[in-house]
Image (cartoon, rainbow, N blue to C red):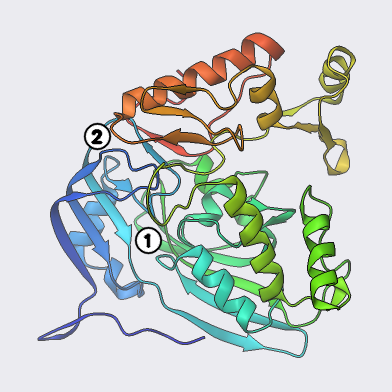
Amino acid sequence: MSRTDRPSGPAGPVPYEWREDVPVENTLRLPARAGRELVMLDTAPSVFSDPEVGQWLADPAVQVIGGGSNLVFVAPVVGRAVRVAASRSWMTAKAVSAVKVVVEAGKGLDELVRETAVEGWYGLEALAEIPGTVGAAPVQNVGAYGTEIGERVVWVEAYDRLEGRLRRLSAEECAFGYRSSRFKRETGRWLITRVALSLSRERPDGWPPATYPGVADALADWAARNGREPESITPLEYAEIITRIRRRKLPDWRRGWPGSVGSFFQNPVVSVQRAAELRRRWPAMPQFELCGGDGVKLSAGWLIEQAGWKGQREGNVGVSPEHALVLLHHGGASGEEFWSLARRVRDAVAATFGVTLQAEPRIIGVDATE
């Protein structure tokens, strides 16, 4: 892993730049523009001591924009925005069994996953093919196939917009939970600049993970084709298996239509008592007990499908026929049109099961609870 030089001007490297009236890229491909955007090309502490930068970040109306993979622009205009474009990464410590990597927030998560997998480092391979930036990943505590980014975080460096200073928060201080974190709960307070991750150089216990639907079959097929035991699979080979599984279920976020943000709703967590009540009425309902008896996780996709929404399309928007958790923008829709679909899906599940789904992406322009 190595640093990548940032743009330079006559006086040397440029730490940031201003852009006026720019389109805001997002994987849903909904129309969105920022009237003015601050683009951070460097995450050095000296950049944040600039009075102009500090004043901009102190304004609570300034929206933090990442890779646009976790944003729903119900309102098409964002007056003021900030985005970290710095994307360097470097290794800061290397031991026999582990390695520590520091990554700037603008780096693509999928890019990082593949870079570390090529090195033979274990820990991120199950996050392959997830769009968005490294800086956005801790906010949602992004996860897939039994892996969450928070499990690998050593610290997160973030600019505290409330206190006007850079802070380095330990993994414990980040308060990671299921698709949640301190950064998500304290909306508008933080601008993540760098993330430090600890990865393993040795094959972990229970390797390779195969408990999720489709993964065990894919591993068995891989072993048969390659004449090798599943335990011998490398992080890169495992990442490629995950990539194929995800591409069968989800639209390609890199190009073309339809647009999506991947899984739109969080899998809801209910009490053990409530889960038992639901199971008595719907015996086939998938349920997953959380560690420590803290509740039971339900499958949002199953709930949506049973409520009759899987594969439904209304004009320019709809629900994927392959995966009921994925809401699609087929082109030409407004943010209001897309959000109206999401609300109707949510309301149908609530009416059928008495369970309220929560949107996983950040909703821009309206109260997401409405």
Q: Residue at 17% x, 51% y: name it.
A: 22
Measuring from the top left, give residue 273's x and y in whole percent.
87, 20
Secondary structure beneath disc 2? loop
Q: Is residue 164 visible?
A: yes
Q: Residues within 10 Å of mark 2 (few under 14, many from 20)?
A: some
Measuring from the top left, give residue 107's x and y in whole percent.
43, 68
Is 78 placed above or below 25 here? above
Q: Residues within 10 Å of mark 1 (few under 14, many from 20)?
A: few
Mark 2: amino acid:
Pro
Is 303 placed above or below 217 here? above
Which quarter of the figure has residue 128? bottom right
- Residue projecting furthest to the front: 225
Mark 2 or mark 1, which is nearer the start of the sequence?
Answer: 2
In the image, is 64 to the left or to the right of 327? left
**1 vs 2, front mark:** 2
Image quadrant where one finds the C terminus: top left
- The numbered disc on residue 165 is 1
Measuring from the top left, give residue 112's x and y in whole percent.
53, 71
Which quarter of the figure has residue 193? bottom left
Q: Which residue is mark 2?
A: 76
Q: Residue at 24% x, 34% y: name it.
A: 76
Mark 1: amino acid:
Arg
Secondary structure beneath disc 1? strand
Q: Residue at 48% x, 19% y: name it.
A: 343
Measuring from the top left, give residue 134's x and y in whole percent.
49, 63
